[in-house]
């Protein structure tokens, strides 16, 4: 199963699997995006827009498979945002941030995105120190837990009292 998941991740977005007779077979795609807005303690504001896409983890995909088998899985707990300072590239096998900043995770609000096939979690974190934030993770627990997605982006320098609003979206697209 893991090999199939890894192979599917290598396929371009919007691609279709084909049978030996070249008839298209639809697949469901799962994509993610992370957008940032920075609020400075001096009142200034920066909208960074979407800073990362497509970094869902193997652990989260494994939970999806478990749910289809009827195993107990609670998806409504994936709302804890964390951020850190290590820009090691994302990998499907990531199970934690590489260097969390050390502040407590922020619980995000959970809503439907612009359409019914989008999960959205928004959290605004106020920093207790000075950091260059370059990674974000969405977890299912306030500490430890399963990492749904790890995103790496261009650094955001924050000082104590600065805030970053993280908007994470997970989009499911049915195959055609």
Image (spheres, rainbow, N blue to C red):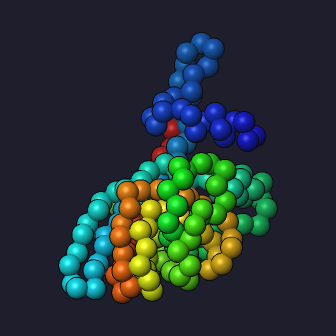
Instruction: Give coordinates of residue 2: x percent, y percent.
Output: 73, 41
Q: Residue at x 46, y 70 (%)?
A: 121
Instruction: Give coordinates of residue 9: x percent, y percent.
Output: 58, 39
Residue 42 in view: yes
Q: Quadrant of residue 11?
A: top right
Question: Could you say which is closer to the camera, residue 76 or residue 84?
Answer: 84
Instruction: Give coordinates of residue 88: x percent, y percent.
Output: 54, 53
Q: Residue at x 48, y 77 (%)?
A: 108
Q: Residue at x 20, y 79 (%)?
A: 44
Figure check: 148 above or below 16: below
Figure check: 13 above or below 85: above
Residue extending farthest top: 21
32 with respect to 9 (left or right): left
Q: Residue at x 66, y 78 (%)?
A: 143
117 with respect to 65 (left or right): left
Residue extending farthest front: 130
39 with respect to 25 (left or right): left
Residue 172 in view: no
Instruction: Give coordinates of residue 114: x percent, y percent.
Output: 35, 61
Question: Could you say which is closer to the camera, residue 68 or residue 48?
Answer: 48
Quadrant occupied by the N terminus? top right
Q: Quadrant of residue 40?
A: bottom left
Question: Could you say which is closer to the camera, residue 91 or residue 7?
Answer: 91
Figure check: 128 above or below 176: below
Figure check: 27 above or below 69: above
- Give the number of marks: 0
Question: Could you say which is closer to the camera, residue 151 or residue 174?
Answer: 151
């Amino acid at each position: 199963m893991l090999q199939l998941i890894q192979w599917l991740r290598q396929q371009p977005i919007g691609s279709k699997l084909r049978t030996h007779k070249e008839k298209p077979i639809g697949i469901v795609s799962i994509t993610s995006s992370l957008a940032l807005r920075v609020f400075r303690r001096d009142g200034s504001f920066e909208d960074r827009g979407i800073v990362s896409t497509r970094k869902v983890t193997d652990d989260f995909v494994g939970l999806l498979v478990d749910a289809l088998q009827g195993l107990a899985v609670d998806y409504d707990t994936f709302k804890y945002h964390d951020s850190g300072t290590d820009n090691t590239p994302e990998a499907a096998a990531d199970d934690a941030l590489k260097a969390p900043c050390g502040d407590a995770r922020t619980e995000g609000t959970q809503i439907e995105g612009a359409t019914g096939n989008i999960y959205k979690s928004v959290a605004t974190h106020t920093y207790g120190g000075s950091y260059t934030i370059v990674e974000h993770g969405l977890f299912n627990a306030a500490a430890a837990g399963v990492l749904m997605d790890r995103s790496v982006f261009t650094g955001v320098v924050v000082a104590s009292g600065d805030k970053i609003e993280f908007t994470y979206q997970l989009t499911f697209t049915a195959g055609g």
